[in-house]
Amino acid sequence: MRTSNPAFNQPAFAPPDWRGIAADQVAAQSGPRGGMGNVGFGSGSQASSTEMTLSGTMMKTSFLLGLCALSAILVYAAVERGMIQGAAVLGGLIGGIICTIILSLIVGFNPKSAPYLAWAHALLQGVVLGLFSYFIADQLGPKADGLIFQAITLTMGIMAAALVVTWTGIVRVGNMGKKILSVAVTGIMLVYLVNIVMSLFGFGGMGFIHSSGPIGIGFSLFVVGIASFNLVNDFQNVHTAVANRAPKYMEWYSGFALLTTLVWLYIEILRLLAKLRSN
């Protein structure tokens, strides 16, 4: 069950002891279960309160997405009105990124902490998005008119399309596709890491990936495509986890992981649109 999203790694998302957890609980109370139809959708059964469900996952993902959006809007408005100025914007952005990474690592290594930390992670991601969005808009000036709305619309559109093609079975990511995604995302992260290290040591970084020329735009298109395909893979992994009778806390963990991919997708779309407008 390899995936390019680190939050959906196999040890955390498909341990062998999931299968049969709810079955054992039901059997202990009412004897052999027999057929139950779709996993996780029982009404009023013990299984429905202990197993991960698609509806529960979508509700928690929507809640985390709402927290992230609210946080981003409030932070963006605060900067726009001068409540956050100068170095505080950059400092808040860097601090938010660091705190988000720390929380991501904690939840990633301990999925059971997701019900308690996923909301804080969503709020911090909103802070990062609000500050980053303002930074991009401020750099473009008048050219940024409507830019953020377009980026949000495209992100939500891709999310809806990924959800439809996954749940209808139109697109399925096989083992080879998962391996290719893993290699692609790892390569992208390494490029970004090397660029940051080069910038810190005064080498100027790899400017071509940030340029508004053909190479920079082509790189952003490639990254947006990988992030979009990665979202399809994430939805597929959620479906697999439900079929594997994952425990209830995995609904929060899945929401945390899906939000991480959506935030990445939004940032890459925003960067792409900014390059196109500044060209």
Image (cartoon, rainbow, N blue to C red):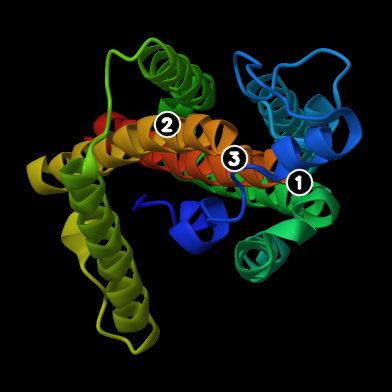
Measured as percent of width and height from the top left, residue 269 is found at 38, 34
Q: Quadrant of residue 200?
A: bottom left
Vertical position of residue 71 compared to residue 41: above or below: below
Q: N-terminal of the two: label 1 or label 3?
A: 1
| Labels 1 and 2 touching (C-beta < 8 A) | no
| Tag 2 residue | 236
31 or 174: nearer the viewer:
31
Q: Name the residue located 62 percent from the left edge and 41 percent from the top edge.
A: 254
Question: Circle 1 sits on which residue?
Answer: 249
Element marked by disc 2: helix
Residue sitting nearer the eye, 216 or 246? 246
**Disc 3 designates what residue?**
259
Which of the 4 image quadrants contains residue 12? bottom right
Q: CA distance from mark 1 to mark 2?
A: 18 Å
Residue 13 visible in this rendered orientation of the protein: yes
Residue type indicated by callout 2: Gln
| Residues at discs 1 and 3 in contact (Cβ within 8 Å) | no
Instruction: Give the x, y percent position of residue 195.
Output: 29, 72
Residue 130 seen = no
Q: How many marks?
A: 3
Q: Residue at x 27, y 55 (%)?
A: 182
Report the Cα–Cα distance between label 3 and label 2: 15 Å
Position of the C terminus, as image quadrant, is: top left
Residue 184, position as x, y percentages in the image = 21, 54
Element type at marker 1? loop
Question: Dividing the picture into quarters, in which one does residue 246 lie?
Answer: top right
